[in-house]
Image (tube, rainbow, N blue to C red):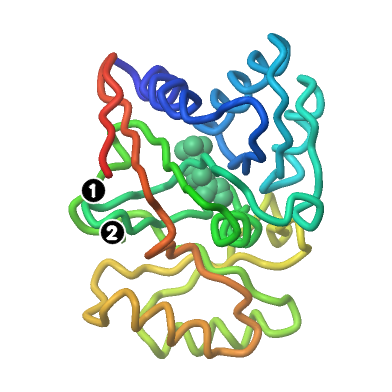
């Protein structure tokens, strides 16, 4: 079973939690893609869904397939958000932001009653950190933040797109750091990173997830 199919299996299992009349947060990435497609099908079949997109890419896709995309301010509160992850551990802690959408993803997750994470089986890990942790930074500060992150032993690398700096939807930079060998507790690390002015957000999602659905072969394994 390949990971693409596992992503679809997880996404379709998650969409069962979406009911007509709900406000739904739409995640970003190749796993979220299958969920957005499936919600598009629900809408075609008459379901009334209002959605908030976590990225420009997701907004474009959702709009194209007929989903009513509204602003977070209009939604005020979301019934459920379904999103992917780069890594998820047994305590529902996540690394997100491989696709660069971590800032809006975290805002949407924070404003959602239920957060479902969908992933193929390769994303399920016993310890976070093989995947580099994305950190979103204000361009004015990025170079100096990199020096601080280096001093913290996190081997920061600024993300590029071709020869240019990668830019998020908010026009910020992404610095990817290596947390594999850090001895600091993840909650403390998150707190410490957020005290550095110019760090807007990190891809550590430690407390927002209610349900994880892993596609494994043809099966969707639900963990809560
Ligand atoms: C984007 C994300 C994605 O959810 C994460 O990168 C997983 O992506 P994919 O489903 O394509 O593997 O956090 O910012």
Dots 1 and 2: beta carbons under 8 Å?
Answer: yes
Q: Nearer the viewer, residue 110 or 199?
A: 110
**Secondary structure found at label 2:** loop
Q: CA distance from mark 1 to mark 2?
A: 7 Å
Q: Nearer the viewer, residue 161 or 35?
A: 35
Image spot of residue 3 (x, y percent): 36, 24
Residue 61: image tag: none
Relative side of 84 to 26, left or right: left
| Residue 49, quarter of picture | top right
Q: Is residue 152 above or below residue 78?
A: below
Residue bearing the label numbered 2: 128
| Residue 143, quarter of picture | bottom right
Decide: few, some or many residues near mark 1? Use Cα within 10 Å; few <14, some 14-19, many ≥20.
some
Please identify the residue farthest to the front as the structure is shown: 21
Q: Tell me what residue is drawn at x 75 percent, y 54 percent.
A: 72
Q: Tell me what residue is drawn at x 44 percent, y 29 percent.
A: 14
Residue bearing the label numbered 1: 125
**Secondary structure found at label 1:** loop
Image spot of residue 4 (x, y percent): 43, 21
Relative side of 80 to 23, left or right: left
| Residue 164, quarter of picture | bottom right
Q: Is residue 8 above or below residue 179?
A: above
Q: Is residue 153 above or below residue 86?
A: below
Q: Nearer the viewer, residue 149 or 184?
A: 184
Q: Quadrant of the N terminus?
A: top left
Q: Tell me what residue is drawn at x 21 percent, y 80 percent.
A: 183
Q: Quadrant of the C terminus?
A: top left
């Amino acid at each position: 079973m390949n990971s693409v199919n596992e992503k679809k299996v997880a996404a379709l299992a998650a969409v069962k939690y979406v009911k007509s009349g709900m406000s739904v947060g739409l995640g970003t990435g190749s796993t979220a893609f299958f969920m957005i497609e499936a919600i598009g099908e629900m809408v075609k079949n008459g379901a009334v869904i209002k959605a908030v997109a976590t990225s420009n890419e997701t907004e474009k896709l959702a709009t194209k397939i007929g989903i009513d995309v509204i602003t977070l301010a209009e939604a005020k509160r979301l019934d459920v958000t379904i999103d992917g992850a780069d890594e998820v551990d047994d305590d529902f802690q996540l690394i997100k932001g491989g696709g660069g959408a971590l800032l809006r993803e975290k805002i949407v997750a924070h404003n959602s009653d239920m957060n479902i994470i969908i992933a193929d089986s390769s994303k399920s890990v016993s310890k976070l950190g093989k995947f580099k942790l994305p950190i979103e930074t204000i361009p004015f500060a990025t170079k100096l933040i990199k020096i601080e992150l280096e001093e913290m032993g996190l081997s920061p690398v600024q993300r590029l797109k071709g020869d240019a700096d990668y830019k998020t939807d908010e026009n910020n930079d992404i610095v990817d750091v290596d947390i594999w060998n850090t001895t600091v507790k993840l909650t403390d690390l998150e707190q410490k990173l957020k005290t550095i002015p110019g760090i807007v957000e990190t891809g550590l999602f430690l407390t927002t997830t209610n349900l994880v659905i892993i596609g494994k072969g043809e099966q969707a394994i639900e963990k809560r």
